[in-house]
Amino acid sequence: MQKVEMTQEDRAYFKKGVKTLCGTELILATKVINDPDIKKMFTQSDLAFMNKELGRQAGAIFAGILRGFKKKNFSEVQKILTGGKSE
């Protein structure tokens, strides 16, 4: 199978898109990218880049959740986790 190499534009688009993910979407994206069949499609450096960006967003989401719990703002925590969706 031919590996797909990300261009600079692809990386910028991915980085920008990751910043919009809620907690649930982040978990799904991480599972998809790290699926053994999908991993075969990307170069090792591209996988490292994608996982690094997903990790950064995970840190931002975790910090937001902690701030929400500290303020006892549970609706904000739910919004961070689900993107504002109730289900």
Image (cartoon, rainbow, N blue to C red):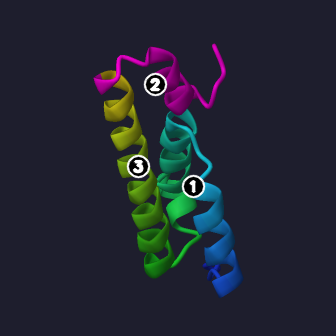
Q: Residue at x 34, y 23 (%)?
A: 71
Please determine whether, in this image, residue 38 is positioned above or below residue 78: below
Q: In the rendered structure, which segment of residues is drawn in magenta? A: 70-87
Q: Quadrant of residue 2?
A: bottom right
Which disc, if any, is residue 19? 1
Say whether marks 1 and 2 touch (CB < 8 Å). no
Residue 30: give x, y in percent of width and height: 48, 49
Q: Residue at x 51, y 76 (%)?
A: 46
Residue nearer the viewer, 76 or 28: 76
Say whether marks 1 and 3 touch (CB < 8 Å). yes
Where the C terminus falls, by quadrant?
top right
Label 1 packing within 10 angstroms: few (<14), some (14-19), many (20+): some
- Classify mark 3: helix, strand or loop: helix
| Residue tagged 3 | 60
Amino acid type of the residue that numbered disc 3 sits on in the rendered structure: Ala
Residue 1 visible here: no
**45 relative position to 32: left or right:** left
Q: Residue at x 43, y 62 (%)?
A: 51
Where the N terminus falls, by quadrant?
bottom right
Q: Is residue 15 magenta?
A: no
Q: How many marks?
A: 3
Which disc, if any, is residue 77? 2
**82 relative position to 55: left or right:** right
Measure the alpha-carbon separation of dots 1 and 3: 9 Å
Label 2 packing within 10 angstroms: few (<14), some (14-19), many (20+): many
